[in-house]
């Protein structure tokens, strides 16, 4: 499997990895094929996930700039075509209390509003673009997987209500069991906003809108070399060289260190894996997930899960550390064990699908929408830490504003600072292994 810390680029025109999403997405909309021959463009965007596609769409629609998107493999070949499908008020992975402590209440509120705006941007695109992506009703539960986590969840509800004036509420154990039967559910924080959908259909919908607005989307066109000279960027792809005045790097967790020295080492690719069961019987449904809400738990190495429209359960969590180990059956078994611990009625249930992908964690665990230091007119967005469905679409919109000349479109300082490089690069995976061991120890308490 492609490993951004090891390989130079993700491939050339590889098909999507097998997944439930690929099997149920229908036919891909038209793209512009691989780059063929030399091209001279105003704006090139590297990576055709939500960030890159949304940037291309907003550049065309709101700024009259018709960008060219360069994708190594297929549209949404990265996270955007393989995620857990939760579009919610999220971005990065910093607890609300810590966010307030780090940046103060008013910045935390502004950031929350930006995340909410991201969710609304997704809703707006689905509605206006008539994107048929099987969007489910709103509702997100953060479930206390341990009785000892209930007090912290209640404190978090108070922060949402008092500091952010947002209507989160605490749902007690008895009520939670109405939607989450089985074990490991001692209460939950409920957020009324946030829904699940079909991630690949969403990406394809944004691709269609971007092309209709005048953007070009070239697949099978990895950037394999990059030369910058006199404010011009020469992006080398197998089919031809694309020369651009401005470049947006939207490769997020799939960013190889070889793409450009200036972007190397600024995110840690972390593998997240998903299993999907066979469809549940009516009885199994009643004894596990009666509703279709988005759910995740309070563990450090958290699990996320939901019931799909055809009554299967999608269950995901952290897995391998390296690409070489990602296909080890042990990780699929660990997820199956975790699923059955939560829902004992599903003991031994068949798993029909299993896949994974690289999420991007930045040094401060928060997203960035910034200029890339050391390069003229190069911008980048990412670092969503596995919670980027809605925020990546919003980031694409904000990047389009930056490309068009607005230096700080959100007004939130930390979002527009370039992520710091991780220290001790050669030892990143060792550090991650140690962190996982510590989290597993804490999660078992
Ligand atoms: C298993 C999993 C579950 C997840 N679940 C959720 C969830 O439920 N909710 C949520 O909010 N978030 C979730 N996420 C995270 C979310 O999917 C991402 O934050 C979001 O899709 C990021 O979009 P992106 O466009 O920035 O990056 P990506 O979609 O990863 O796109 C990057 C693209 O860049 C391309 N690329 C890389 N290098 C090059 C190159 N040299 N040349 C050309 N192209 C290149 C790649 O091929 C890739 O297609 C999950 C992620 C995973 C992996």
Image (cartoon, rainbow, N blue to C red):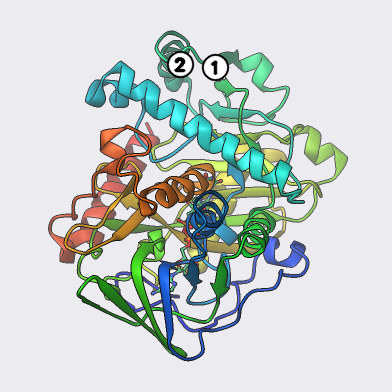
- Can you see residue 426? yes
Which residue is depicted at the point 25% across and 42% down? 364
- Residue 403 image point, x, y percent: 37, 54
Q: Which of the two residues, 294 or 399, is positioned nearer the viewer here?
A: 399
Q: Which of the two residues, 24 or 420, is positioned nearer the viewer here?
A: 420
Disc number for residue 160: 2
Q: Is residue 382 above or below residue 104?
A: below
Q: Is mark 2 within 8 Å of ligand 1?
A: no
- Can you see residue 346? no
Marks 1,2: beta carbons within 8 A: yes
Q: Is residue 125 left or right of residue 252?
A: right
Looking at the image, is mark 1 or mark 2 earlier in the sequence?
Answer: 2
- Residue 269 image point, x, y percent: 35, 59
* SS label for mark 1: loop
Residue at the spot of label 1:
168
Q: Residues within 10 Å of mark 1 (few under 14, many from 20)?
A: many
Q: Is residue 294 above or below residue 379?
A: above
**Occupied quadrant, residue 411:** top left
* SS label for mark 2: helix
Q: Is residue 38 above or below residue 41?
A: below
Which residue is depicted at the point 65% across and 65% down? 19
């Amino acid at each position: 499997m492609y490993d951004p810390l090891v390989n130079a680029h993700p491939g050339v025109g590889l098909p999507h990895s097998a997944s439930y999403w690929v099997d149920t997405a229908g036919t891909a909309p038209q793209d512009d094929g691989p780059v063929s021959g030399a091209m001279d463009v105003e704006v090139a965007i590297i990576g055709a996930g939500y960030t890159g596609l949304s940037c291309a769409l907003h550049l065309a629609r709101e700024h009259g700039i018709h960008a060219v998107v360069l994708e190594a493999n297929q549209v949404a070949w990265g996270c955007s075509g393989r995620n857990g499908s939760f579009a919610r008020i999220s971005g990065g992975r910093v607890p609300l209390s810590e966010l307030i402590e780090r940046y103060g209440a008013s910045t935390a509120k502004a950031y929350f509003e930006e995340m909410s705006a991201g969710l609304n941007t997704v809703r707006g695109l689905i509605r206006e673009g008539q994107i048929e992506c099987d969007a489910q009703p709103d509702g997100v539960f953060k479930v206390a997987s341990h009785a000892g986590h209930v007090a912290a969840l209640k404190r978090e509800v108070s922060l949402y209500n008092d500091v952010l004036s947002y209507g989160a509420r605490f749902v007690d154990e008895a009520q939670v069991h109405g939607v989450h039967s089985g074990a490991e559910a001692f209460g939950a924080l409920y957020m009324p906003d946030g829904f699940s959908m079909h991630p690949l259909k969403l990406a394809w919908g944004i691709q269609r809108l971007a092309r209709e607005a005048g953007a070009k989307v070239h697949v099978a066109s990895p950037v394999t070399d990059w030369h910058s000279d006199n404010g011009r960027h020469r992006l080398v792809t197998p089919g031809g060289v694309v020369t651009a005045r401005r470049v947006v790097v939207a490769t997020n967790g799939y960013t190889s260190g070889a793409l450009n020295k200036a972007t190397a080492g600024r995110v840690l690719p972390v593998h997240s894996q998903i299993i999907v069961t066979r469809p549940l019987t009516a009885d199994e449904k009643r004894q596990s997930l009666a509703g279709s809400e988005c759910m995740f738990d309070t563990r450090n190495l958290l699990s996320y899960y939901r019931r799909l429209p055809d009554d299967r359960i999608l269950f995901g969590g952290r897995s391998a550390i390296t690409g070489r180990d990602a296909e080890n059956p042990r990780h699929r078994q660990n997820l199956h064990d975790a699923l059955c611990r939560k829902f004992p009625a599903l003991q031994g249930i068949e798993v029909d699908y299993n896949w994974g992908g690289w999420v991007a964690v930045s040094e401060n665990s928060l997203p960035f929408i910034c200029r890339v230091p050391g390069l003229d007119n190069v911008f980048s967005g990412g670092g969503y830490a596995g919670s980027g469905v809605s925020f990546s679409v919003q980031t694409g919109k904000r990047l389009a504003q930056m490309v068009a000349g607005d230096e700080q479109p959100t007004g939130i300082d930390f979002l527009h600072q370039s992520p710091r490089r991780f220290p001790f690069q050669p030892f990143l995976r060792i550090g991650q292994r140690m962190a996982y061991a510590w989290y597993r120890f804490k999660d078992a308490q």
